[in-house]
């Protein structure tokens, strides 16, 4: 006999809990299923813990530079990794417990702790119990990709999840993967005091970005003593004493990198392989992502997929926006769509990269006449005052409509500056509006008018 609900939410990442609460407030009887940790990736192994660790690493970095600011710090700066981890754990625990308490105390919500598997298009089994609902929402997130790399089965390795348990300083951390996760951990542990080598199969870091951004990020990391090995097209690993040897087969430098610890950061896969989606008829693509339409409905009526598992975004903010889309359409009579949103994200190395809209490559592909503007962070007063002049700001504009198509803000507070540009893009206002605005001094954003003044035709 199945227990009947109005809706079932599988997973408690960034979209599931908020959607469950909205439906419960609307008088619906809701079941929430979580098999492991409340809060999903962001709370437990993603944004919150990593940015907490980034903050500790930055504190160490600033302390080492104290003399530049006329500040004396006695002795060598030392990092107590157990305390760093304890601080991170405390912040994560508060968020994790908060989500669990939220779900368990909200009227009309029943929480099931266990592994959900579909038994049909409207039925889910969890720990021997069958639940049934006319609406089912999948919010199961993703996990780190573990590649089929020669020798990996014989070598201990870490992923972003495993790094959460590290309470010591690796002597030499070898990071395989030169994109967001790998770069953030690489810089973080270099600042903690580890020797760090980043190994990337491609010919540049963060390949989805424009080459000039990839080059600038590489220079920022190398300036802190991080070794970057590109074009590592024949990766392999093997034990080497108590550590690990990574075969890179690069065109330049040694063909082997010997380290004490290995971090795999080469991508993510969705947690959809053990949900028995076939029993419900839910379609996935070749990578396991659940196929959804522009309103996040799957191939089966009455089933939606939100967050990382649908392949329509890999960020906390895209997952939360998925909730907003579904809630609006189901409960508020809206007609919101995934394609309404403007791509936006950030890379949290220090200084950060804030992104809004298209890259230069994507803008060129539209065939439009383009304007491009660029301003070095060395021109920004706030950057000079803080002694952080690395990076630049870049703007892409449609020459005919004068609408902003994309922005890249690599530098101090670049993530926040990108937000202000994103607001103008959503308002669908011409770039000239920036010239007429009055910005607060001294900020980084006050240089946006100066950035607009540099606009010129893109060759």
Image: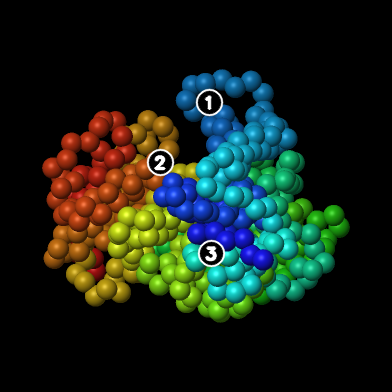
Closer to the eye: label 3 or 2: 3
Q: Position of residue 442 (x, y in %)?
A: 29, 31
Q: Which numbered marker is on residue 133?
A: 3
Nearer the N terminus, badge 3 or badge 1?
A: 1
Q: Which numbered marker is on residue 412?
A: 2
Q: Is residue 116 visible?
A: yes
Between 308 and 400, the one nearer to me in the picture: 308
Q: Residues within 10 Å of mark 1 (few under 14, many from 20)?
A: few
- Extreme residue toward the front, this view: 1
Q: Which numbered marker is on residue 67?
A: 1
Q: Classify residue 286 by image quadrant.
A: bottom right
Which residue occupies 61% across, 50% down? 111
Please state if 240 lies on the left or on the right of 211 as rendered: right
Q: Classify residue 455 by image quadrant.
A: bottom left
Nearer the N terminus, badge 2 or badge 1?
A: 1
Which residue occupies 27% across, 49% down? 423
Between 253 and 355, the one nearer to me in the picture: 355
Q: Position of residue 221 (x, y in %)?
A: 53, 50
Which residue occupies 76% across, 62% down? 245
Q: Is residue 358 visible?
A: no
Q: Position of residue 71 (x, y in %)?
A: 52, 21
Q: CA distance from mark 3 to mark 1?
A: 63 Å
Disc 2 on helix, strand or loop? loop
Q: Residues within 10 Å of mark 2 (few under 14, many from 20)?
A: many
Q: CA distance from mark 2 to mark 1?
A: 20 Å
Which residue occupies 14% across, 63% down? 401
Q: Residues within 10 Å of mark 3 (few under 14, many from 20)?
A: many
């Amino acid at each position: 006999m199945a227990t009947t609900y109005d809706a079932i939410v599988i997973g408690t990442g960034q979209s599931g809990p908020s959607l469950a609460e909205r439906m419960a407030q609307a008088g619906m009887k809701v079941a929430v299923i979580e098999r492991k940790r409340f809060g999903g990736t962001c709370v437990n192994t993603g944004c919150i813990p990593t940015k907490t660790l980034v903050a500790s690493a930055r504190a160490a970095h600033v302390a080492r530079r104290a003399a530049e600011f006329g500040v004396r710090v006695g002795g060598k700066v030392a990092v107590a990794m157990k305390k760093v981890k304890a601080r991170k754990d405390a912040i994560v625990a508060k968020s994790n417990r908060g989500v669990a308490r939220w779900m368990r105390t909200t009227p009309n919500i029943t929480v099931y702790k266990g592994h959900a598997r579909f038994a049909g298009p409207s039925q889910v089994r969890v720990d021997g119990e069958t639940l049934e609902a006319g609406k089912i929402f999948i919010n199961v997130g993703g996990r780190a990709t573990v590649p089929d790399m020669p020798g990996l089965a014989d070598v201990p390795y870490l992923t972003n999840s495993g790094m959460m348990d590290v309470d010591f300083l690796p002597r030499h951390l070898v990071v395989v993967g030169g994109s967001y996760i790998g770069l953030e951990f690489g810089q973080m542990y270099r600042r903690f005091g580890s020797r760090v080598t980043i190994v990337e199969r491609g010919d540049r870091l963060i390949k989805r970005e424009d080459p000039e951004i990839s080059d600038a990020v590489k220079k920022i990391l190398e300036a802190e003593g991080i070794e970057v090995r590109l074009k590592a097209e024949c990766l392999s690993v093997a034990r080497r004493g108590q550590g690990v040897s990574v075969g890179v087969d690069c065109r330049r430098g040694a063909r082997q990198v010997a380290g004490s610890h290995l971090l795999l950061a080469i991508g993510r896969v969705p947690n959809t392989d053990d949900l028995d989606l076939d029993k419900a008829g839910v379609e996935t693509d070749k990578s396991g992502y659940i196929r959804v339409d522009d309103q996040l409905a799957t191939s089966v009526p009455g089933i939606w997929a939100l967050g990382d598992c649908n392949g329509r975004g890999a960020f906390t903010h895209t997952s939360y926006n998925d909730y907003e889309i579904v809630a609006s359409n189901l409960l508020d009579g809206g007609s919101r769509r995934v394609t309404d949103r403007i791509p936006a994200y950030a890379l949290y190395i220090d200084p950060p990269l804030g992104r809004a809209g298209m890259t230069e490559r994507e803008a060129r592909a539209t065939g439009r006449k383009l304007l491009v503007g660029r301003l070095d962070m060395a021109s920004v007063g706030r950057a000079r005052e803080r002694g952080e002049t690395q990076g630049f700001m870049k703007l892409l504009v449609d020459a005919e409509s004068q609408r902003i198509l994309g922005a890249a803000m690599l530098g101090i507070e670049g993530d926040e500056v990108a937000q202000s540009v994103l607001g103008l893009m959503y308002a669908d206002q011409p770039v000239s509006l920036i010239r007429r605005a009055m910005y607060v001094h001294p900020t980084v954003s006050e240089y946006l008018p100066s950035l607009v003044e540099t606009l010129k035709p893109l060759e």
